Amino acid sequence: MSKPLKQIHLAAHFPGVNNTTVWSDPDAGSHIEFSSFAHFARTAERAKFDFLFLAEGLRLREQGGEIYDLDVVGRPDTFTVLSALAAVTERLGLTGTINSTFNEPYEVARQFASLDHLSEGRAAWNVVTSWDAFTGENFRRGGFLPQEERYSRAREFLSTAHELFDSWRGDEIVADRASGTFLRDARAGAFVHRGQHFDIEGQFNVPRSPQGRPVIFQAGDSDEGREFAAADADAIFSRYSTLREGQAFYTDVKNRLARYGRRHDQLLILPAATFVLGDTDEEAREKAREVRRLQVSGATAIKHLEFVWNRDLSAYDPDGPLPDIDPDLGEHTVARGRAQVRMYRDPLATAREWREKAAANNWSIRDLVIETGSRQSFVGTPATVAETIDSFVQADAADGFILVPHITPGGLDAFADTVVPLLQERGVFRTEYEGTTLRDHLGLDHPDAEAPGQRAAS
Amino acid sequence: MLHLAVALDGAGWHPAAWREPVARPRDLLTASYWTDLVTEAERGLLDFVTIEDALGLQSSRFTEPDARTDQVRGRLDAVLIAARVAPLTSHIGLVPTVVATHTEPFHISKAIATLDYVSTGRAGLRVQVSARRNEAAHFGRRAFPAFRFEDLESPAVRELSTELFDEAADHVEVVRRLWDSWEDDAEIRDAATGRFIDRARLHYIDFEGRHFSVKGPSITPRPPQGQPLVSALAHETATGAPFRLLGRSADLGYVTPHDAGQARAVVAAVRAEQDAAGRAAQPLHLFGDLVVFLDDDESTAVARRERLDSLAGQPYTSDARIFTGTPAQLADLLQELGEAGLSGFRLRPAVAGHDLPAITRGLVPELQRRGAFRKEYEAATLRGLLGLARPANRYAVTA
């Protein structure tokens, strides 16, 4: 007998401040107005998606000492948008990226617990961490955290939040008018946390929310990040959307779970994925090429090269050859406030490889950036895309995908209308929501509150 | 014309409010409860609602937890309640409480800017300080001395109070600068040059103060109202710090005079702080805060208050005047206080489920009959309802 089909999980990443967003398209709308978010969320819910995903950045990116102006700039506050979206949707999960460096556990825990109440159990938290003094300039704390401590702070932040969520069991409010007893227990919400990063105590003031705790996402890719996810996360927002890389990542992370006494199905792997649809596969491929050219203007190509070269390359012609000079290997100073600069761990090797490729193919700087930049994950007719997504999930390259359309806010509409029905026909995607909470959609357990100390001992 | 707001807090301001048959004590953590309250307030054409909040459990004591189990305990984040209600309402202003003492002005600024976007121009904030030791311990980053209400005028407490209110003024200054850190037309989407924004129209705010420094710009573009409403509750103290906060930073202050004479004195004191801050020419609304027990006849209102007091085990007291009577009597009082210089009132319903509808269905029609309150919403934004212009951006270079 063959293995039962895995059910696919799908999520929608609101396109905003990233270089896949094509803001110059005539159909591109606001990345700020609530109507865009409402449209996007309603499309995702109409298509029975598991959740909507919002990214976050706490300082505008700079390059060469100036605010980076070639991509979408600006975004609204994550919590506020998600809470408003809870009013215009009924089942869709609401996932927000919230930084564990420039926040305090008590405040973030009460915001997520509040969001979970106000959405009747649909809140999720993508826990990210940073350390840079550049972002810190916007906050009381400043850039206070050594890089090597960022995961230790993130893990302690999350475990502290966990203690706060569990400080209410869920049965404390009796609200008995006759006896005048509102609370069963005057110590409801009591907590004490003494740690390296947080030394706090008192009473949490948001009673237990419908999901108990929000669903926890983790997005880091380093070894430490993967351990963090294996120990504490419910889902990983990964970047490996190809079959081979996806399978390698999937196997690696799922194999780490046993160390923490966790089952394979207690951590979902959900890579970010882009897509381009067409009436024929060839038409889709042609559209995908056009989209990549729109995503990478000449000016954008130069800026992208600067991530590797760590130098001002503004004098170079994007339609001309690559620079002869080598990257500056000193501390990265050109581009600030973005994660991409850390992707190029050996800039000299990358520069050499790119020069060779460009010479062999007669590519300009812009051609090179377009060709070596990430391809769309799924390109083809709706049937091709549905089949590819399904095959990736069945082959354990992922448990589903977080789709990142390139147009705001209508970029998900065609996927919802054409690909989702095909996945439903294949019997691998829900036709109706079966539960009400995000944990229900993702097949995750609803946690009971753990007594203080129980978690550390487990 | 008077302006009217209501202050929403749990089941109402009386500690036994949750025990009334009309109360919904098991719904206080649900979206539908808050939606129903704000919808009722909007039905009455009120200018705005405020939503109480704190970074600790409610307490009947001034500065410390009380371990009581007979009153409402537990609440939701006020900004998120306001955001949850925003798409379901269309005219009423939404003014959540934010605690300056333990929060990041950068986060608060973008949260309220975003509330302004999701409500299309109806956002404000009510800024509050916290000197509670137990709340400070939730953050573990500063410690405050223990004190009681009776110690309010001691030198140590006066120093602390001055520090917290002045820090709140800095907090508001950062929040306001961040709202202005994007000019209105900064997003240009210029396909020819590939530029999404004109970075010359984005501004570092470079705030440096005693408690924090903030670089900017905001990550969120300038909100629809330009500057959402900034409000604060202020009492008269020997340091003058609360009134100074109003004078320096607020568009609207809540004050607690108990009669027309006190109202005139409070108005004069706040105006003096406004002058001292160099803001004499700017509009600053002063709203009187009143707790209200409203019924169709006075004896019913009195009996209800007594019944609630007996359930609570003690008479209800408040910083604000407690009004017990009929909508017509309340209208008389509001008009009298209005003549003493208050431009509006923030009413604190003793029992949300009873006194809020009594305001919207009793007091409002009474004031309308007297020509003292609007008959329909006349503006699309909260600033508009309050007669406040959309302010110019402090960073924009005028041509």
Image (cartoon, coloured by chain):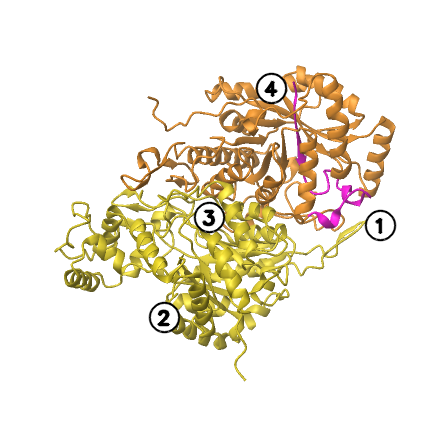
Chain colours: A yellow, B orange
Q: CA distance from mark 4 to mark 1?
A: 44 Å
Q: Residue at x 40, y 27 (%)?
A: B394
The residue at the point 75 percent across, 33 percent down is B357
Q: Mark 3 sits on what residue?
A: A410
Q: Earlier in the sequence, mark 2 or mark 1?
A: 1
Which amino acid type is marked by label 1? Ala
Question: Could you tell me which secondary element the residue under label 2 belongs to?
Answer: helix
- The answer to whether dots 2 and 4 both sit on one chain is no
Mark 1, other Cα within 10 Å: few <14 / some 14–19 / many ≥20: few
Q: Within the magenta stretch, is there residue B7?
A: yes
For label 1, the residue is: A178
| Amino acid bearing label 2 | Glu
Q: Nearer the viewer, mark 3 or mark 4?
A: 3
Closest to the observer: A193 or B118? B118
| Residue under label 2 | A245
Is residue B238 found inside the magenta-colored segment of the image? no
In front: A68, or A408?
A408
Q: In the image, residue A66 lies at what x, y percent?
A: 28, 41
Q: Secondary structure at mark 4?
A: helix
| B185 relative position to A164: left or right | left
User: Badge 4, how many Cα within 10 Å: few under 14, some, many 20+?
Assistant: some
Give me the C-alpha separation between circle 2 and circle 4.
Answer: 69 Å
Q: Position of residue B151 (x, y in %)?
A: 63, 36
